[in-house]
């Protein structure tokens, strides 16, 4: 399952996020979205979690949780239109 993680502090790195997510299950990849012009984080990321049950647990546990001073938004990613 592809997970969207939003409202992240701009200092958060992919490795930080991966560590947090791995407390709840197996994580295939984490991709922090970077602004092309400024080369800074846009404040959101996507994570690929192969096990749907673990992915649902990540959503349940981390949606609304505070991390680096901000309340994360964690939900199933919807495909681009």
Image: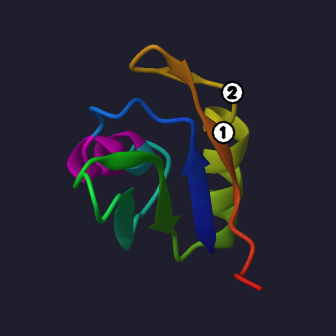
Query: Residue 62's x, y, as percent?
Result: 61, 35
Would residue 38 appear left or right of 45 to someone viewing this image? left
Q: Secondary structure at mark 2?
A: loop
Judge by depth and name the residue closer to the eye, 80 or 61.
Answer: 80
Q: Does the magenta portion include 31?
A: no
**The residue stretch that appears in magenta:** 13-20
Residue at x-position 40% and y-position 65% = 27
- C-alpha gap between disc 2 and disc 1: 6 Å
Q: Quadrant of the C terminus?
A: bottom right
The answer to the question of whether label 2 and label 1 lie on touching residues, with beta carbons closer than 8 A, is yes
Residue nearest the viewer, comparing 29 with 33: 33
Which residue is label 2 attached to? 64
Q: Is residue 52 left or right of residue 39?
A: right
Label the magenta part by its dominant secondary structure.
Answer: helix
SS of the residue under disc 1: strand
Q: Is residue 27 left or right of residue 63?
A: left
Q: Which residue is mark 1?
A: 73
How does the figure colour the protein chain or chains? Answer: rainbow
């Amino acid at each position: 399952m592809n997970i969207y993680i939003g409202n992240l502090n701009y200092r958060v790195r992919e490795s930080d996020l991966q560590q947090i997510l791995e407390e709840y299950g197996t994580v295939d990849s984490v991709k922090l979205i970077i602004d092309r012009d400024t080369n800074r984080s846009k404040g959101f990321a996507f994570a690929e979690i192969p096990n749907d049950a673990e992915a649902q647990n990540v959503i349940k546990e981390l949606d609304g949780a505070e991390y680096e001073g901000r309340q994360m938004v964690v939900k199933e990613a919807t495909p681009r239109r």
